[in-house]
Image (spheres, helix red, strand yellow):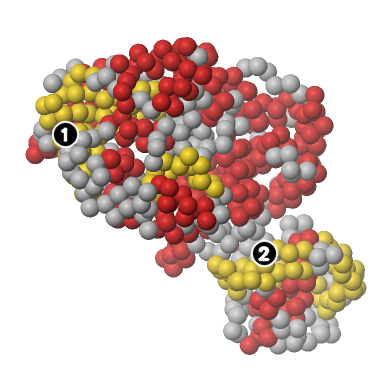
Amino acid sequence: MALRQIRTIGDPCLNKVCREVDEVNERTLTLIDDMLDTMYEADGVGLAAPQVGVLKRIVVIDVGDGPIVMINPEILETSGSQTGSEGCLSVPGKAGNVTRPNYVKAKAYDEEMNEYIIEGEELLARAICHELAHLDGHLYTELVEGDLVDTESAEDKKKKHRK
Amino acid sequence: MTDTINEREIALDILMEVNEKEQYIHVLLNEALRKYQYLEKNERAFISRLVKGTMERRLTLDYVINQVSSVRVNKMKPLIRNLMRMSVYQMMYMEQVPVSAVCNEAVKLAKKRKFNNLSGFVNGVLRNISRQLPQMELPDDYSIKYSVPQELVDMLTQAYGEEAVKLILESFLKERTVSAVTNTVRISKKELVERLTAQGITVKDAPYVKDAFILSDYNYLDDIQEFGEGLFNIQDISSMLAGVIAAPDKDSTVLDVCAAPGGKSIFASLMMGGTGRVISRDVSERKTEQIEENVERLGLGNVTVEVADAVMHNEVDDERADMLLADLPCSGLGIIGRKPDIKYNVSKDKITGIVSLQRSILDSVCSYVKHGGYIVYSTCTLNPQENEENVRYIKSKGFETVDISESLPDGLIEDAKKAGDVFYDKLVKDAADGMLTLIPGVYECDGFFVAKLKRI
């Protein structure tokens, strides 16, 4: 298991448009494994390659139903809307209300470069939108309605500090 | 992306801590609500209702689950057990939540917490329960009906009688109110109520205590300017009544030996209109800080806060007090309506331990009272061992009871009459003997006991 460092807001990697993946090689597979490990370790439900400093169009997602790897993903269709609290591993300790489509249909390639179609509702739809935005250099903070709020209490911060 | 915050998951985490690790529900709930301050008011209310409700009805919920589930509640994995209880609570007592949502959310949570293999069980049992609920009849057994351990039902029946037990147990399940007392040194109740009402806060007259009122429809107490300015203090009606019974004369020296969070000290200070002196003590700095905070906020000049362990006798204090307030640590059976975890943790052993602590505090503090001065003994429990028997114990230390009939508020007498002759007779007889037992359900407040005695 290899963990990579999660870049946080302010890091230029997070504002760049990522490149398409032409072929999946050893390095790509290692990157994907590392991204999953990093996401699970951070208790995240999604992670995009630029968040670990790699400007490639790759995201990993797990909303509780097992890992999903998306290479060169594209959103095909959306419908409905949901408004709810959203956070990002690159914006630690914060959350804000974001409106996203409630249903998303997307296409992507898996690790063997087979094209597939995925449909998701609620949290999965939200996660797909959130992660794909990273690939074009966008963070959810641009979309927050109202204030960005602290999700950590003062005591949590103290505890972390001690660690 | 980080995980989104789910109110049910927050509630489940709190229930796990309370039920599996015996943490205090009110502490955890307050912490969580502070942490998730940014959630909408209705979302926070949902969490709070779900956690308290599930705790309050635990035995009833377990009964219902056991009727349907092949795995008994106590054999389930802790997370699944609490998830099931919480979900059945929503089905039975939160009509606005559709059954399908309850099942779906429960399945999602089970999966999220890596119980993929049990998500089918959760779904199956919950759907079965929802189908069978309309026909299901709960037994007429108080323990299951009111979700109170049989041992406690027996204790209360023995002490207060069948008729009272039903009223007590029913009242434990009722919504609790937040009551407050006006800082009459600085503002009149009328003016304060006008200011609060103008902000959209609902204010009602409180029963029994003339300067008190009931607050509702506010978001955070700390956000109410009048609270920050110290124009009122939060205190339960029952505890205010201890102050009403105490009725210290102007210019008295009042010693409050177990004072945190300071309600009774403050009430006494207000009753003396800022004259005299109130010495307000508790065992640790953490506790006295609460008192100090309240005293400072109210701006009371006649209250001194000190750290002192009531068990340790202090000779310089002998015969110092015109009035001693002894609101001792107790088993808390009167406030089960506020802290439902209390009822599941009562045991005869624990009570015996508490009684002996109360006795050692009484051994140490009784001599602080001047001859001719008073002790006002109180507890927030419904247990003769900790109440009447301790009054007898105080008497044996050279005290006599004082007739408190004249101090009883009219509303209290009316409510006793309304509830029945048994209760009225008890009220009158007890009062002549210096005692008052506030039975919740008969009276509109928490369960409480107060006695006034005079040192000979």
- Closer to the camera, A131 or B315? B315
Residue B171 at what x, y percent from top left? 54, 28
Q: Secondary structure at mark 2?
A: strand
* Residue type, mark 2 in image: Ser
Image point 66% across, 49% down: which residue? B8
Question: Which residue position is annotated with label 2?
Answer: A85
Of badges 2 and 1, the one in the foreground is: 1
Assign the N terminus of chain B to one quadrant of the image: bottom right
Q: Is residue B360 visible to the viewer in this orientation of the structure? A: no
Residue B333 at what x, y percent from top left? 44, 28
Taking the image as shown, residue B304 lies to the left or right of residue B296, namely left
Taking the image as shown, residue A88 lies to the left or right of residue B354, namely right
Taking the image as shown, residue A49 lies to the left or right of residue B51, namely right
Question: Which residue position is annotated with label 1?
Answer: B322
Chain letter behind tag 2: A
Q: Is residue B414 visible to the viewer in this orientation of the structure? A: yes
Q: Quadrant of residue A10?
A: bottom right
Taking the image as shown, residue A48 lies to the left or right of residue B272, namely right
Image point 23% across, 47% down: which residue? B274
Q: Given contact means CB atoms under 8 Å apart, are the residues at marks 2 and 1 in contact?
A: no
In this rendering, do the residues under marks 2 and 1 share a single chain? Answer: no
Q: Quadrant of residue A84?
A: bottom right
The Cα–Cα distance between marks 2 and 1, rounded to whole angstroms, is 58 Å
Chain letter behind tag 1: B
Image point 63% across, 62% down: which residue? A43
Whether B292 is drawn above or below B345: the answer is below
Whether B4 is drawn above or below B423: the answer is below
